[in-house]
Amino acid sequence: MKYNLSLLFFILSFGCPLKAKMSVDLVNDTQGVALGGYDVVAYFKSQKAVKGLKKWSSVYQNHQYYFSSKENQELFDKDPSSYVPIYGGWCSWAVSYGKIGVPVDYNEFFIKKDSSGKERLFLFFTGTLRKWEKENHREQLKKADKTWEKSEKTF
């Protein structure tokens, strides 16, 4: 635990580079696959992180998503904006402190309403989920939304 927090503060202290072009469709995308290949629909249906497979994939806003079943892929294709994570899949807690690009532990998540009242997937760096829950959720949302909006205008 101490190591994880130290690593987080190390990452945050140097800042995380923003991608050259930032927009609301920016996602935590490694090796051409969004969210490390985790199935975003499974978070909502199973309340757990489930790895997807390449054979069930869809592209949304230039990012490829993997799914653990054909059914999940079809649900995503009908309404992708309902499943993509808030803040591009970057650590929500870090975004609330002005840092975009902090990687996440795909098992550290919750689904809650965003500031508009829509159910959204929030992802977190190891240990920061508990920090978010201890802090004022509405205030954290306001701060994160402000950071995200500002980054869209900057890039």
Image (cartoon, rainbow, N blue to C red):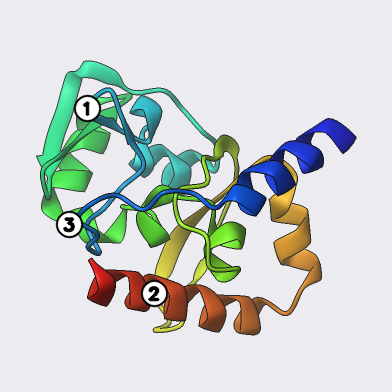
Question: In the drawing, what numbered circle is on residue 118?
Answer: 2
Amino acid residing under circle 3: Asp
Q: Position of residue 110 (x, y in %)?
A: 58, 54
Element under label 3? Answer: loop
Q: Height in image: 21 above or below 70? A: below
The numbered mark, 2 or 3, whose residue comes first in the sequence reads 3
Element under label 2? Answer: loop
Give the image quarter of residue 145.
bottom left
Q: Position of residue 18 (x, y in %)?
A: 36, 53
Q: Residues within 10 Å of mark 2 (few under 14, many from 20)?
A: few
Element under label 1? Answer: loop
Amino acid residing under circle 1: Gly
Considering every residue shown, the one lying at the far front of the view is 14
Residues at badges 1 and 2 in contact (C-beta under 8 Å)? no
Amino acid residing under circle 2: Lys
Q: Height in image: 58 above or below 45? A: above
Question: In the drawing, what numbered circle is on residue 79?
Answer: 3
The numbered mark, 1 or 2, whose residue comes first in the sequence reads 1
Residue positioned 23% across, 51% down in the render: 20
- On the image, numbered disc 1 is attached to which residue? 32
